[in-house]
Image (tube, grey):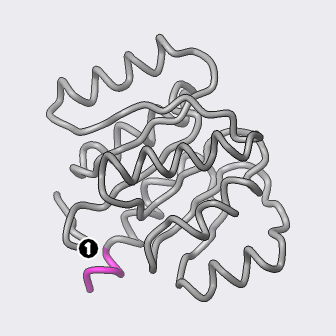
Amino acid sequence: MSFEFHSGRVVAIVTGGSSPAGRFVTRGLARWAWPVVVVYLDHQSRTDATIAEIITAGGTAISVRADLADDLDVQRLFTESTAEFGGVDVVVHTTSNGAALLCQHAARHVRQQGVIVITAAPEVLAARVATQLRERGITVERVPPHGVLAYLDKWRQQKTG
């Protein structure tokens, strides 16, 4: 069930890749043949296990350790993701950490018509960031963890239809 949004496959960043919700989303996206960037701050061994599971099943994934409250770490997350896969189309934020800095960088780095899915309580985005996301056609949605894959499945169907 592969889907090509641009010249290559859809690329997703998933924060909290070592958490149960992050692992669930990451494995689901990998089943769609989407390259996945698994973001973690702690629990490297659990993240490594998730990456190994995806690769063993024939998927493509890398991990990036990043503190989502650190501007340089978030910038590096997008730089490494783009260097590895050529760009980013989807960001799924599954941690309870604030998403403001992540959205700020996503507004500059996620490809046009991409999507940001946040599973925690919604935050108010800075007006400048909200404007930049809107101008680039990047959707930001709050979706409960169990609904992320269904939401993204609907999103990808709309992009191909």
Looking at the image, which is closer to me, 49 or 149? 49
What quarter of the picture does the C terminus occupy?
A: bottom left
Residue 117 position (above or below residue 41): below
The kind of secondary structure element at disc 1 is loop
Residue 14 position (above or below residue 100): above
Q: Could you tell me residue 23's position as x and y percent?
A: 46, 31
Q: Could you tell me residue 101's position as x and y percent?
A: 74, 54
Q: Which residue is mark 1?
A: 6
Looking at the image, which is closer to me, 117 or 44? 44
Q: Could you tell me residue 3's position as x and y percent?
A: 21, 65
Left or right of 37, for residue 108: right
81 magenta-colored: no
Residue found at x 55% / y 35%: 21
Write down the quadrant of residue 124 in the picture: bottom right
Looking at the image, which is closer to me, 107 or 143? 107
Write down the quadrant of residue 70 in the picture: top right
Residue found at x 62% / y 70%: 140
Main SS type for the magenta part? helix
Q: Residues within 10 Å of mark 1 (few under 14, many from 20)?
A: few
Residue found at x 57% / y 63%: 116
Magenta-highlighted residues:
157-161
Q: How many marks?
A: 1
Mark 1: amino acid = His
Question: Residue pushed farthest top?
Answer: 45
Left or right of 4, for residue 97: right
Residue 91 position (above or below residue 112): above
Residue found at x 48% / y 50%: 79
Residue 150 position (above or below residue 97): below
Q: Could you tell me residue 40's position as x and y percent?
A: 57, 29
Left or right of 31, for residue 66: right
